[in-house]
Image (cartoon, rainbow, N blue to C red):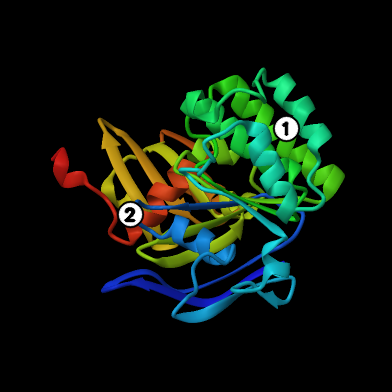
Amino acid sequence: MIEIQTVTKRFDDITALSDVSAAIEEGQVFGLIGTNGAGKSTLLRCICGVYQPEKGQVSIDGDLVYENPAAKAKVFYISDDQYFFNGTPMDMVRYYQTYYPAFDAERFDKLMTALKLDPGRKINTFSKGMKKQLSVLLGICSRTKYLLCDETFDGLDPVVRQAIKRLFLQEMDGNGMTPIIASHNLRELEDICDHVGLLHKGGILFTKDLDDMKLGIFKLQCVLRDEEELTGIGEHFPILQKEKRGTLYTLTLRGNSEDIRGLMTELAPAFWELLPLTLEEIFISETEVQGYDFKELYQ
């Protein structure tokens, strides 16, 4: 388990993380989402021991990670802008073998062949997407317990993205790997993540099971007879968002689906439909509550 306890990280007068606490269990895919500048990359660097927090601590399986080679050896970090030597993929393999003794060079060769990447080609001639693929393969074949991924799917075509997701699931089933994935592309995370943490302005708003999170927030589309019915809905359930087009209301509500259905059956409007929200819609709703929106741009 990775435990993050009241971590604060500053850069001069900028507070990148403020009292962040979270627990990442083994055997799940943890998605780290957040607004621009929320501190996702900084948090990943604290987890892998690159940064030392000014306050709080990060531990991996009970051991503090900063300046602890044994704890760091359980983690492979894929940064958004991965660094490579001025050489070939095999040069990177030889380097990582010195730090990760369990590195599976045979599997690396097979995966490179499957993705049609040349292990003898200079990495500086690779495209952005090819470099991303190489980073993921190095991480998977390192055989670490935890794989930290910062915008891993950025720059990959749809076919490769699906292949990488399948590789993650294979590693989880076969070798007990736990991926932690930070991404702006919430639709990419939705079909692979079990648990999600939402960062905003350096603080963590929540960490929740993805299925449980979807059960607590819904989109209600309805045609109401008058404003009193709208007021009645708001008295029973918090309305996070409200949009009206003609006679059709689209409301984002927080509550229990059965309770919402019961109220709408009782009100009996001309039309109503209850829909689950996507992860992207939940992100927008939760951050707008915190004042993160740019509606003034198009009003």
Q: From this viewpoint, which residue is outermost toward the bottom?
A: 55
Q: Is residue 237 above or below residue 134?
A: below
* Tags 2 and 1 touching, CB below 8 Å: no
Can residue 233 be seen in this snapshot? Answer: no
Residue at point 36% right, 73% down?
10
Depth order, front residue of 2/129: 129
The image quarter containing residue 139 is top right
Instruction: Return the residue at label 1.
Output: 166
For badge 1, the amino acid type reads: Arg
Instruction: Return the residue at label 2.
Output: 288
The earlier-in-sequence mark between 2 and 1 is 1
Residue at point 75% right, 39% down?
169
Quadrant of the rendering where the N terminus is positioned: bottom right
Residue 123: x, y in percent?
Answer: 54, 29
Residue 107: x, y in percent?
Answer: 81, 33
Residue at point 69% right, 48% down?
96
For badge 2, the amino acid type reads: Glu
Depth order, front residue of 74/16: 74
Residue at point 33% right, 62% down?
290
Quadrant of the rendering where the C terminus is positioned: top left
Residue 226: x, y in percent?
Answer: 28, 44
Can residue 158 be seen in this snapshot? Answer: yes
Q: Which mark is residue 176?
A: none
